[in-house]
Image (cartoon, rainbow, N blue to C red):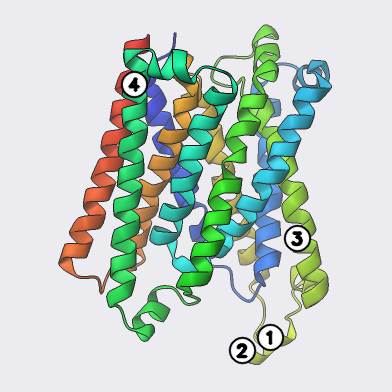
Amino acid sequence: MGNPILGVFFHWLGGLSSATFYVPYRGVKRWNWEIFWLTGGIFSWLVAPWLFASIQTHDLIGVLSAAPASTKFYCVLFGVLWGFGGLTYGLTMRYLGLSLGMAVVLGLCTVFGTLIPPIVAGEFGSTLLGTVPGRINLLGLAITVVGIVVVALAGARKDATLSAEQKAAAVAEFHFSKGIVVAIFSGIMSSCYAFGLAAGEPIRELGAAAGTGVLWVGLPVICLVTLGGLITNGLWCSFLIVRNRSAGQWLGRASTQTVASDAGGRLPLLRNYLLSALGGTLWYFQFFFYTMGESQMGRFGFSSWTIHMASIIIFGTLWGFAFREWRDAAPATRRMVWAGVGLLVLATLVIGYGNLLAQ
């Protein structure tokens, strides 16, 4: 039957992991973006998923081998499409900052990722609109969207009142119009991860039949979806590496840009590898905890996507305050963003309650 309250807690842990994964990258020095993104991505999309799935899944290879070819294809395909969203997610952080960037991307991602799976499955009317727990879940989704809008408006109000110098101090590469375009694209494509997870239901059933515990049956699905993401990100980063001639940074050789800007200083090679590995592993843990949370949500498992997105924005906003992105914002603007965070916390509790009723 599951325990939705425990599921909400797991989703909070996943949201914290997701909101935190980019923080270690801020400490990477003198590596081009494509170098640290791909280095961390190897841990996000390959090392961590297969490591933890092999530990927790009974006969991982057997389960994946027995899965229908079409199921595996769609998991990887949606991962490839999601990869475009994940790729531009990092760019959104660079152009808009943690708070505003996450609000725009995850707002769109929340709506598409939550509603499309039950609509495709033909469950929107019967399961959501046709039951009291379903309508409570829709209420939670609506509160989430309102909370996201409030946080985004607070971010826009903050940026409108700051000088160009203050914006640069908070987000070194701030560019509002470019960031919004990238964020919209990223949000829509990022929702494909939810579609990939939904497509992997036959794999979860095979894992359960093989004796895998209910908390872990979703881990093999992550392996396939993230494999698709690795394809997209790997191709783009490889293009940038060739264009920028930055491959030597992996071996400690500084590029022309880093020599010019850093007076030929030595690359902090080991530190860069460790920080990238940490950031990549933290990224993976969002879905490690997500599968645990989803396993507890019962028939409304698709509502997990809403809770996950809300949790990311909650903790992402807290990181924004920690990095002083809101330092020069007016008190009314700061109160506004806290109101948005409060709405998101309320939304996760409402959805948890709706799932509890469904038990």
Amino acid type at image mark 1: Gln
Tell me if I can see residue 218 in this picture: yes
Q: Residue at label 2?
A: 261
Q: Which label's residue is closer to the chain start, 3 or 4? A: 4
Residue drawn at (64%, 14%) of the image: 212
Q: Residue at label 1?
A: 257
Viewer-side label of 1, 4? 4
Q: Position of residue 45 (x, y in %)?
A: 69, 44
Tell me if I can see residue 50 in this picture: no
Q: Residue at label 4?
A: 135
Q: Is residue 99 left or right of residue 257?
A: left
In this orientation, which residue lies closer to the viewer: 286 or 251? Answer: 286
Q: Residue at label 3?
A: 236
Viewer-side label of 3, 2? 3
Q: Which label's residue is closer to the chain start, 3 or 2? A: 3
**Which type of secondary structure does the marked residue at label 3 adopt?**
helix
Question: In the displayed structure, would residue 76 be above or below residue 251?
Answer: above
Question: In the displayed structure, would residue 254 be above or below residue 176?
Answer: below
Q: Which label's residue is closer to the chain start, 1 or 4? A: 4
Residue drawn at (54%, 20%) of the image: 215
Amino acid type at image mark 2: Ser
Kindly indicate whether the residue at mark 2 contacts the one at mark 1 (C-beta within 8 angstroms). Answer: yes
In this orientation, which residue lies closer to the viewer: 104 or 279? Answer: 104
